[in-house]
Image (spheres, rainbow, N blue to C red):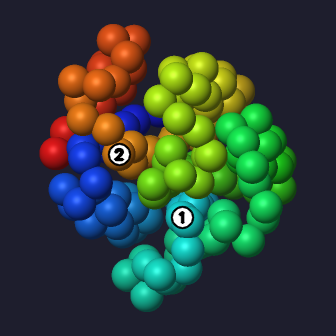
Amino acid sequence: MVQLIVGRKGKGKTKQLLDKVNGEVKEISGNVVYLDKSAKHMYELNNKVRLVDVSQFMIENSSEFLGFVSGVLSQDHDLQQMYFDSFLTIACMDDKDLEPAIDKLEKLSKSFDVDFILSVSMDESELPAGLKDKIILSL
């Protein structure tokens, strides 16, 4: 399943995402990965969460990002959840690429039984209609 936390920049999406991951990691039995644009939030995450600084991997477009995510999935068969902070930035995409990328993440989610939780810097009204049912929090 793919879930979205949406809102304009500066509305508190990262705080909500950090609270969610830190709460969930205590409840689940599998592994959790948190992808971010830097290691800035390292000390705010539970030590059971694997933080990956995506900026170190020279990702230049959304296809490369999806390949990167697939690589992470292939290396950890116990992976249960992945959190993506600043999704549009770390995935190197603009608004028009959003729906196709989330459709691919949904397919990966079903194939590998992994949940994806994304923070997206867009207002709920700007999201494509097909994604509105994936919103868990709008700020």
- Along the viewing direction, whichever of 106 and 85 lies nearer the viewer: 85
- Residue on which the image places disc 2: 121
How far across and down, in percent of the image, does residue 19 sit?
28, 65
Q: Is residue 139 above or below residue 30?
A: above
What residue is rendered at 68% in x and 38% in y? 62
- Along the viewing direction, whichever of 49 and 89 lies nearer the viewer: 89
Q: Is residue 110 above or below residue 27?
A: above
Amino acid identity at mark 2? Ser
Residue 31 visible? The answer is: yes
- SS for dot 1: strand
Residue 73 visible? The answer is: no
What residue is rendered at 61% in x and 46% in y? 91
- Residue on which the image places disc 1: 36
- SS for dot 2: loop
Amino acid identity at mark 1? Asp
Query: Which mark's residue is nearer the viewer, 2 or 1?
Result: 2
Viewport quadrant of the C terminus: top left
Q: CA distance from mark 2 to mark 1?
A: 14 Å
Q: Is residue 50 above or below residue 33?
A: below
How far across and down, in percent of the image, does residue 55 sit?
67, 67
